[in-house]
Image: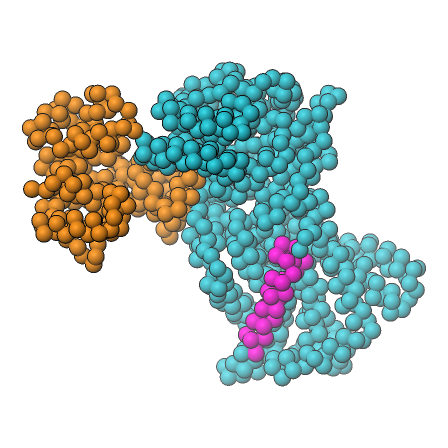
Amino acid sequence: MSSHCDACRDGSIERPPGEIVIALVGNPNVGKSTLFNALTGIGVFTAHYPGTTREVFVGTSRVGDRSVGVIDLPGTYALGGTGEDAWVTRRALEDLQPDVVVVVLDPTTLARNLYLALEALDLGMRVVLAVNLIDEAAREGVSVDVAALGVTLDVHAVSTIATSGVGVADLAQAAFAAVREPTPRLRTYGRDLEALLHPLVVAWQGNGAPDEHTARARALAMIGGSESAFGLANDTVRAEARRVQTAINSHFAEEPATHLARERHGSAGMLADAVTTRTEHVRRLLPRDLWSLTTKPVTGVPLVALAIAAVFAFLFFVGDFLATGFSAIWAAVMSPAIGTLVTAVAGDGVVSRVLLWGFDAGIEASLAIGLPYILTFYFLLGLLEDTGYLNSLAFLTDRLMHRLGLHGRAIVPLVAAAGCNVPALVAAGQLPTKRERFIASTLVLFVPCSARTAVILGAVGHYIGLEAALIVLGIVFLVWGVLALVLQRILPGSSEGLVMEMFGFRRPSVRRVAAKAWEQFREFLLVAMPIVIAGSLVLGGLYETGWLSYLSGPLRPFIESWLGLPAVAGLTLVVGMLRKELSLQLLVALSAATAGFAAADLTGIMSEADLIVYVLVNALALPCISSVAVFWRRHGVWRTISVVGASIAIALLVGGILARVLPLVGIA
Amino acid sequence: MPTAAMDEYLESIYKLAEKGAVRPGQLAEIMGVSGPTVTATLKRLESSGLIDRPDGGVALTLAGRQAALDIVRRHRLAERFLVDVLKLPWAEVHDEACQLEHALSPRVQQALEAFMDNPAVCPHGHPIPSADGVVAPQGGGPLCECAIGDAVEVLRIDDEDGALLAYLATLGLFPGTPVRVCDVAPFKGPLLVEVGDARYALGRDIARKIVVAGEAGGSPGRSGGRS
């Protein structure tokens, strides 16, 4: 699978055009993306390196009559770290060679934030500091002497409020000014460390480093464990580096990289203390104190239950309501228009009926998922994420999700799946590791969505009773649980330990959340709609030409002999791929036609046991085309085929067993 | 009476035992001698009743432990003296202390201790055993056993490949860092800890590798210490 969305380019991330190019780096959740949005207008591209999920945003800003290329890098705590965020940030900085690195800082955790700034300075980068979120910090009684910070570090420092655009123009001006100036003066660490480091700096100066700045930057990078710095070194420098590392190790009795981190944090902490003023007497409750209620188990667990119920209810009821409304409007307005158009072009026959399957039903099917479920759900999810609540949720549910080989955050897609699998798959795609993304996405496909639940309620609930419907749902979840345990066992690797920063409450930016939701919606339409239309055309062709019945032959052994269902039911299960609730509608229509019943009463052609087996197979087998399309885009063709194949096998297995067990317990 | 070489062995065995089971191979590596030399010296130590050889490993006997603590005490006192009083740089004091430690009689040790105001730890942060062989508990306990409200300090991070140590170090979480436990998720879930101004959720498996000790009630450092 090589194609992603049209705006994504794998592997090669291009330097944006502009008189100068700046890169935004910063810890997660410091408002870096908001600052990026405030700087750039249209023409924003996203890209990622193969095998990574962290996106790099690239855009261009106009400052007066000058242009600035802007790169937004993933939020990270360090440049020299081992995580994916650090790797992508480091790699992009090396590849794109920005003229200025803007380190975005959160004043409330300035000490930790400055670590990254010191690291960038140590690497010899031309740094401009943006002290962001000063409004929120002020609310917490924290103020930072930005000018003093800049003077101490010999760099330009600007205070910004990205959400309202304050200081954004100053930031661009500072970047222009920084480019014309020499690189900041060198800073030093403790005397012992400097003394031990010195031989390595000297070694670099004699072996390839053009100046003292570069020599020192590379020496520090090597001590910090940077592989690329080792790659640049010749044997003399490497030997010296090993000597220096050993010396540092024995002198401080700890790993050189750890010791460097310790000294850097020490410097950052002292610097932060010197420029930060905290007002002790804050009368009212801080947002942070209120927010801590979301992580206290006593108050947090009920909130989690509430949030999960809200997500579920939102997708199940609001989403369903919107989808129904949308379908009604579509039937009233678009269907007749498309019908007229198709008839005008293709006449009135088989061809036009097939075209209607694709361009009427197909487009409607993708929009009926895209608009009510993806667009609205993503807005809700974006709000939860922007406020920082998803982290609180993940914290409290981590233990539960760990049993499934997942992290706390995975609870959101799994719950969302009960509404609609498609947005749930998109949410699952944001989990940190590949293994987790696959486990979560696969489990999502096996959660009965509202359409499948509607079929269970509409068939079994309506004709047999609510109890029977609940039992069917119970069986589906039992199968789901077994699958979760099996996946956890058979997939190599284990879930990595959780280390997640917990943020206080942040006021969400509606504009940003809306933009993100729109992006997801657009991406879904681009990926899924062509597949859904093509699939609908094929299904429509088979159906309208009557060739669908030829499929009955090959299906017969499975459907009739193994499951004990009428052959026609098998066909409806296949057509159900377009939209899962379509299978039941079609079954009613087909059974009326086949068996000659005037009334659409399924009990005429199917026994109670048949109905139960039918809805169960419908719920377990063959996810709908839209979700298959999204799964495919994220996990590739082979994993998609395996999972869809597995869904059929599991459905046949469970359905077949049920068909034999039900008569034994008195249901026939 | 143990010789100076046997002293060095006892000291090394003691230090290794602080971290876990001791194998002869580790000793050969640390002492910079061959395997057979180690085996020969270990035989002598064993016949002197200072060590046992359970399952081919090396363990101090009660007498061996007393002797080792005595050497460790002299070594760490000497280091303290060299750094605090003579102002020698850290990097050089270990080797100097190895020379000096053999010259310290119990009386000189006592005088040194009083002169330096009874230091608790050596310049590297390791505890100095008392004259009667008592070591302040430094064992600590895993962070995951802490309760809400505990204020503890990171002693070490038990991490084989160093990747976790490196990652946590970028967050400012390394040995010596004070940590406060704010919340613990239900069903033995992750811990929410405060480090400086920032707060992190740490999964159980991570928290298990972070060894801490603390003053607050309910901290694991007190009861779990080495005897």
**Above or below, comparing residue A468 to residue B64 in the picture:** below
Q: Report x, y in % for residue A465.
A: 57, 72
State the residue in front, A74 or A628: A74
Q: Report x, y in % for residue A366.
A: 72, 56
A104 left or right of A567 in image: left
**Above or below, comparing residue B197 to residue A494 in the picture:** above
Residue occupying the point 9% across, 52% down:
B47
Residue occupying the point 79% across, 61% down:
A358
Residue occupying the point 61% across, 26% down:
A100
Chain drawn in cyan: A
**Above or below, comparing residue A663 to residue A47 in the picture:** below
A435 left or right of B35 in image: right
Q: Quadrant of residue A127?
A: top right
What secondary structure predominates along the stretch shown in magenta? Answer: helix
Residue A67 visible, this orientation: yes
Q: Report x, y in % for residue B200.
A: 43, 39
Q: Quadrant of the N terminus of chain A?
A: bottom right
The answer to if A131 sits in the magenta stretch is no
Residue A130 visible, this orientation: no
A163 left or right of B56 in image: right
Residue occupying the point 19% across, 52% down:
B39
Colouring style: by chain
| The hue in which chain B appears in the rendered picture of the protein | orange
State the residue in front, A597 or A615: A615
**Magenta residue span:** A627-656
